[in-house]
Image: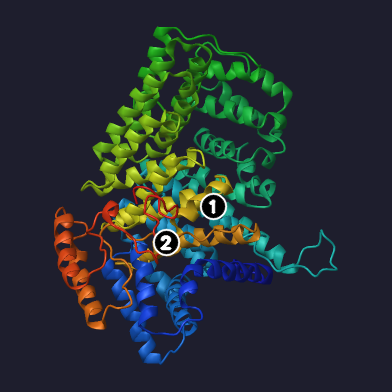
Amino acid sequence: MGLFGFGKKEKDKMKDGLEKTRTGFWGNIMNTLTGSKIDDDLYDELEEQLILADVGPACAVRLVDELHDEVEEKHLKTGQEALDALRALTFDHAIRLMHTVSTDASFDQLLEQARGEKNTLRIRTYLELFQEYHTYMSGGNKRKLLAFLYELLLYPEGDVRRLAGQLMGSVLANSGPKYRKELPSAAPQDAAAPALLSVLEESLGLWEQTVAQCLHPDHKISPKHAQRISNSLKAVAETLLAETEDAARLAQPLLSRLPDATDEDSFVLLDALYHTPPHAVSTLAPAADRLRALLCGPDQSRRIAALRCLRRFRAAAPEDLLQEAAVPLADDLPAVRALRGRLSGKTPAPLSESEASLLYLSNLKTAVPWVVKNAQIDLLQADALQHTGNTFHTATHLSNLLSVSEHLPVREHAGRALLTISTRLSVDQRNEIIVDLMRELENGQEQIARFIPRYLGRLLSTMPEKEIRESIDFLDGLLRSGSARAASTSLRTLGSLISALPENSVLTEHCLGLLLTGVSHYDESVHRSAMTVLCHDVIGSERLPFSLRAHCFARVSKKLLCLLAEPAPGKLTFFNRAAMLNHLYRFLVQACRAGCAFPRRCRPHSFPARLTRFPPDISASCRKFVRSAMRSISPWTNSPGASVHSRGCCAAVSSICPWPTSGTPMSSRTPSPSTSPCRRTSRACDPAFPAGA
């Protein structure tokens, strides 16, 4: 087995999982097509399902017309044959994607498109695509991807550099023993296949080369850019050592360089080690002298880096080194003194109002290193939890850091600290902070609003229902505004809120409906953001309870399937859809293995701006006229004059074709006695369609 290859066991598991996923994913369409003869009634039934699923009249008519053409071209007779034709169209979609990422020529073209991209949002989308499909690439293409990701470590945006570093760690981890040939059943458990030894050696060599390139970039790179590359080593190490099966061995390239490293390299290595699992480091004894020099050196940030590592790997540190590190020095900053005290188990003394103000001011200075700011945030957080006098002022300060800090680690650390101390705030105080963060979202500036949603959504979940509804309405307004960036941040906030709300909350239904609104958005960037939030952050997130993910999937699956029937307008959107659907595939495989059954939902009688099923006594010419009328309505569905225009068209249709249309208010309709209770269900009562969708 070569490097980066798949073993037979992995292929069989993937094939079995995808087969189960395909069976469940096509269940609703199969109920209509299987066992039916292909006639006008079948086309009407399929078109009705698409229209009732809110896919849109024009799209529904187009899909049915395409199927009609396929049936006539291939002389299909039964519904099962039509179902097979639809499956073939889906497989063609998947084959084109796999061809692009697995063929050298097409992958090179895709990589050059990503390399020439200047838009930050599109670069993030490319990184998400590579994150999802890098395991399917050949060894040569993975090395090309590593080279491209190394170039992205120079990018100005901190989160892009972090995503690139994390993806480098994932690629390196997936080149190790996770992908290997299975041993014979009679082989000893500790035996290693001959090919595995070479795989391990090559994986370790790639990692050592990456460490060297991050510590000492090319001399042609400016010092500012070289520092960006060096600071990204922690992102690579964190992902690599978390995903690998041999973390202790892969941590050695970091530990072995530490005793003889310079002060600058020592800080980078200690920062990377701090983000590795505790079990990866067995002893810090060889680096004891280097740590002592840093603890007594003049640089405060290096003192903090050494103290953080000693706290994290306390069991691996010599006892005499821990005792020496706990002794404070005269020139220690308050945050450094507090870290030394924690090594000996001491609780920091309460901060006075003037001491807290000095820390607030220091955290807002650009000249203060980010590691010092993070240590000061820890000190402010501990003080706010123990002494409530400064809690609200500290929370306001943390919300400002979350919005305006120029360092990504500081923003994230401030956001986590804000969530921690928010339990000590009153409802009015939390509401004031939420209003300030909402204003930053409305600002629409990418640098300010990018990192707020993850923490704002969780903070919103702690508020009473009335305040949450008002906030959701505000986010709805941002989603429907003309700013694509404001709409994207609104969607990410909704995804964070869904993950923090209780599973049976009625607010979850509303948030899911707004996410589906984002999926159907005319702007491609908003559509991609909605797909990422819904499929990756909610349904595909391993951090959320499986029951919550299943609840969300049951609510949106039918509408999502119909919305995605619309062809992707661009190649990047196509790849984004495929990558996000891969998360749904994995979730559905888990659901099948767990025996999770999704109940079939009742279909509503009709929806606003949609037609109900054709009565059997309507002639073919009348049906053709109605389809033409609905084609004229569809371009107006998202315009300000949609309601007036739709009512006029529906009135014209009703004059020729007398049955209830969407222009008739739901309360004034009287279903026929032959209509089943299931068909009389209104939209608000149908659990398959979330409120606000």
Q: Residue at x 55, y 54 (%)?
A: 170
Kind of residue sitting beneath label 2: Arg
Q: Is residue 554 left or right of residue 570?
A: right
Looking at the image, is mark 1 or mark 2 nearer the viewer? 2
Q: CA distance from mark 1 to mark 2?
A: 20 Å
Frontmost residue, 453 versus 612? 612
Residue on which the image places disc 2: 603
* Coordinates of residue 518 in the picture (x, y in percent): 33, 52
Frontmost residue, 103 versus 475? 475
549 versus 467 height, above or below: below
Residue on which the image places disc 1: 550
* Coordinates of residue 593 in the picture (x, y in percent): 65, 60
Q: Residue at x 37, y 20 (%)?
A: 428
Q: Residue furthest front?
A: 673
- Figure quadrant of residue 430: top left
Category of crowding for the residue at label 1, using alpha-carbon neighbours closer than 10 angstroms: few (below 14), some (14–19), many (at least 20): many
